[in-house]
Image (tube, rainbow, N blue to C red):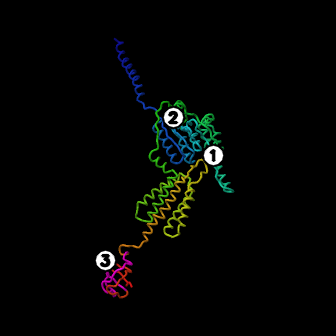
Amino acid sequence: MKPSHTFLPRLLAGAVVLAAACWRPAAGAAEAPATVAVIRINGAINPLTAEYIVDAIAAAAEEKRRCLIIELDTPGGLMESTRIITKAMLASEVPVVVYVSPTGARAASAGVFLSYAAHVAAMAPTSNIGAAHPVNLGGEGGKADSTNTMMEKVTNDAVAQLKAVAEKRGRNAQWAEDAIRKSVSITAKEALALHVIDVIAPSVDSLLTLLDGRSVELVNRVDTLRTAGAQIVVQEMNWRHKLLDRISDPNIAYIFMLLGIYGLFFELSNPGAVLPGVLGGIFLILGLYAMQTLPVNWAGVLLILFGVILFIIEVKVTSYGVLTIGGIVAMFLGSLMLFKEPTTDFEPVAKLSLQVILAATLATAAFFVFAVGMVVRSQRRPAVTGAEGMIGEIGAALTPIAPFGRVKVHGEIWKAKSATPIAAGDTVKVTAIEGLLVSVEKVE
């Protein structure tokens, strides 16, 4: 009977092991599928782009994505914004992949820095990378020497930064220096052969397959990418990013600045209107926000303001069109000069549309010369109603006036006074009014 006492515990233990074995696959089946985040950058690198990428890196780490893929097509951008992004990439707790795409895309100047800072750099076929050399647009003589010295400092700083990142990521440091000093640019195939990038992939799906199993060094560990079959989650810009990105367009920033000037002028000209002042303030602030991301030439801003001042003076002073012509010329030239030519490849290229400039200049001239002019002229026109409207009116004496009497003006009977005697029935003219007493004189 002794063996029978050990049989039951063994049976129960076997049942527990079997249940655990059956439970493990079920638990595995309940696990969430692997996901990778994808964002798209198409345009210059600016403060808004930097904020968008940094937020995406933080979100990918928080949501436990397998990696973050940045689809990149950029002509360059601001150096400070580029530094912010590269610092975020180097400190990222989730693998960051920069993928220069679609086919025909480029990663110029700032794009080179982002590609080098990524844990994995990839390119689509027929895309290119490079051309990160600062551009010297200085003048002549001592000014040119000073500008050349500054460009040399900028160049050396950029080279040191990119070489440090290249050594960190194990990429070609010599080519990185050549991209800045010699402005070299290469194709995707050349970049792969020179160890500038890691992968060439025709699509994001192909890229995920090629990334699977690759080991990358994060800030706190070495991670092996498991991306084959991963679900792609595209992170679009939120409404705030889209709005700020839209108003950062040079043409829109220019229009907002003019609308702000119009609104504030109306408010100052007609205190208490409120709405023009509120809208003008909003437009001006939005315009100034956009201007901070653009290479503004303040000489152009001053010329635009000078043109507006000439239009205002034209309304109040008869110049036979001279001030209007001067205002149009000043505003047109100021608009052309509003944005500086970039001095380095890390500065955005900002140009105003000639059609926008012409339309805005002519609209502003018409606005001040006709619309504002009509308002000012109406304010100067003599009053035709109320007490002021009585001055100069013709009436008749109802009684003798010596010095007081009564007159009829506009069908109304008024108490009147006169410095000279006036007989009843004489025609009189109102010269002044004091409350309910009018001063009159005889009309000969």
Q: Whole-percent x and y of residue 363? A: 49, 59
Comes first in the chain, label 1 or label 3? 1
124 and 25: which one is in front?
124
| Cα separation between marks 1 and 2 | 30 Å
Left/right placement of residue 341 relative to residue 69 reads right
Q: Amino acid at mark 3?
A: Gly
Question: Would you say residue 413 sits in the magenta stretch?
Answer: yes
SS state under label 3 = loop
* Residue corresponding to mark 1: 133
> Where the N terminus falls, by quadrant?
top left
Q: Residues within 10 Å of mark 2 (few under 14, many from 20)?
A: some
373 and 257: which one is in front?
373
* Residue corresponding to mark 2: 204
Magenta-highlighted residues: 389-418
> Residue reaching furthest top?
1
Question: Would you say residue 235 sits in the magenta stretch?
Answer: no
SS state under label 2 = helix
> Where the C terminus falls, by quadrant?
bottom left
SS state under label 1 = loop
Q: Residues within 10 Å of mark 1 (few under 14, many from 20)?
A: many
Q: How many badges with numbers are in the image? A: 3
* Foreground tag (2 vs 3): 3
> Which numbered circle lies on residue 411?
3
| Disc 1 to disc 2: CB gap under 8 Å | no
Q: Whole-percent x and y of residue 15? A: 37, 20
Comes first in the chain, label 2 or label 3? 2
Comes first in the chain, label 1 or label 2? 1
Which residue occupies 50% across, 36% down?
67
Q: Whole-percent x and y of residue 259? A: 47, 58
> Which numbered circle lies on residue 18?
none
| Cα separation between marks 2 and 3 | 89 Å
Which residue occupies 53% across, 67% down?
321
